[in-house]
Image (tube, rainbow, N blue to C red):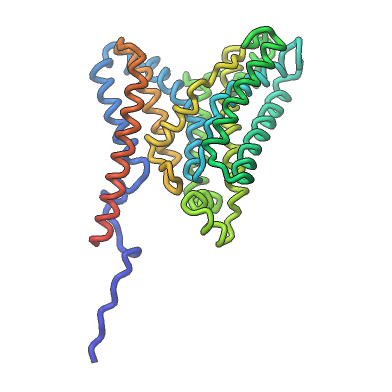
Amino acid sequence: MTTQPVARDERLQSLSPWQRLISRPEFGALAGLLLVFAIFTFAAGGSGFLSLSGTVNYLEVAAQVGIVAVFVGLLMIGGEFDLSVGSMLGASGIVLALLVHPNHGHLPLALAIPVTFAVAALIGWFNGWLVLRTGLPSFIVTLATLFILRGASLGFTKLITNLTLVQGIDDQVKTPLGRLFSGDLLGVPASVWWWLALTLLMGFVLNTTRFGNWIFAVGGDSNAARNVGVPVQRVKTVLFMLTAMAATLVAIIQVTKYGSADVLRGTQLELNTVAAAVIGGCLLTGGYGSVIGASIGALILGMVQQGIIYTSVDSDWFQVMVGAMILGAVVLNNALRGRSLLLRRKR
């Protein structure tokens, strides 16, 4: 009697270090970061790009995109979009400024900040509820929210102040609590530390916790996830709330730093954060991506934006480079994933 050889389960086959590396969502972004850094080191290294101030400049620009991109990336992994983050930033800044203004809310900063976060969380909850209740694409729902928030912010701010900005709050926001959001630590702006902390925290949540597994599950197949007990509605609603609150955190950083709020702050933030997430390896179809990758994508955008300035090239070319990087990242990520799957099958 002969014994038939047992086929080896391909899921148990070990991968080489190179295969593990190229199968990571953030691999393409990391390669792009090294390339962009090399280009600007060569083109602008002698004009300040490599200096301490130059490094701090692009890190600060990247941080204010990256804080939101971390949560936009999570939402995209969960299979949804939020195009309202830019107008959410502008609206949250106005809410905070009016709450602390001596002629309006006259609240202490310690109370105004939680109230502002609560307003943002409510709007994020409404976005999630509307998407799940109506079955409409989140792209459409949050696009509508973008216009509603922007228009309402403009209308109410002009009604109250006769302007599109709120000023005269320096004494209210230049406090020890305000410096927690806008001060420096070791010569590095607080926004960069917030960005780093949130990237590490949410990377840990995504990759090591049950909630992180749920995010991948609802983005991959909501129906299948629901059938195995994943609370799909709760997960997606929480993600929408976190995204709105992340935009609010950036608004607080800006208000406490500049001592003012402007309705138009945050314009195009929604596009930059989606770009950062896509460059970082998040799929538009959901179920795949990386928080670290989204942050690397934000770093690339900040580096390009400031690097162009150091090369004395017209800043209008920034958008051209962003568009090219999005296309390149998508093509590279698809090629790397395809190559990784092919190598795995051959084993």
Q: Relative to 271, does residue 154 appear above or below in the rendering? A: above
Q: Position of residue 339 (x, y in %)?
A: 26, 50
107 relative to 4 in the view: left or right: right
Q: Visible in this render: residue 275?
A: yes
Q: Quarter of the image containing the C terminus?
A: bottom left
Along the line of sight, which residue is nearer the eye, 309 or 218? 218
The residue drawn where x is 42% and y is 44% is 289
Q: Relative to 193, does residue 154 appear above or below in the rendering? A: above
Q: Relative to 73, does residue 39 appear above or below in the rendering? A: above
Along the line of sight, which residue is nearer the eye, 309 or 197? 309
198 relative to 260 in the view: left or right: left
Q: Visible in this render: residue 252?
A: no
Instruction: In the displayed orientation, state which residue is furthest to the bottom.
Output: 1
Q: Position of residue 186 (x, y in %)?
A: 48, 21
Q: Quarter of the image containing the N terminus?
A: bottom left
Q: Quadrant of residue 328?
A: top left
Q: Position of residue 99 (x, y in %)?
A: 72, 19
The residue drawn where x is 59% and y is 60% is 229
Q: Position of residue 125 (x, y in %)?
A: 65, 38
How many numbered tags mark residues here? Answer: 0
The residue drawn where x is 51% and y is 38% is 81
The residue drawn where x is 38% and y is 19% is 305
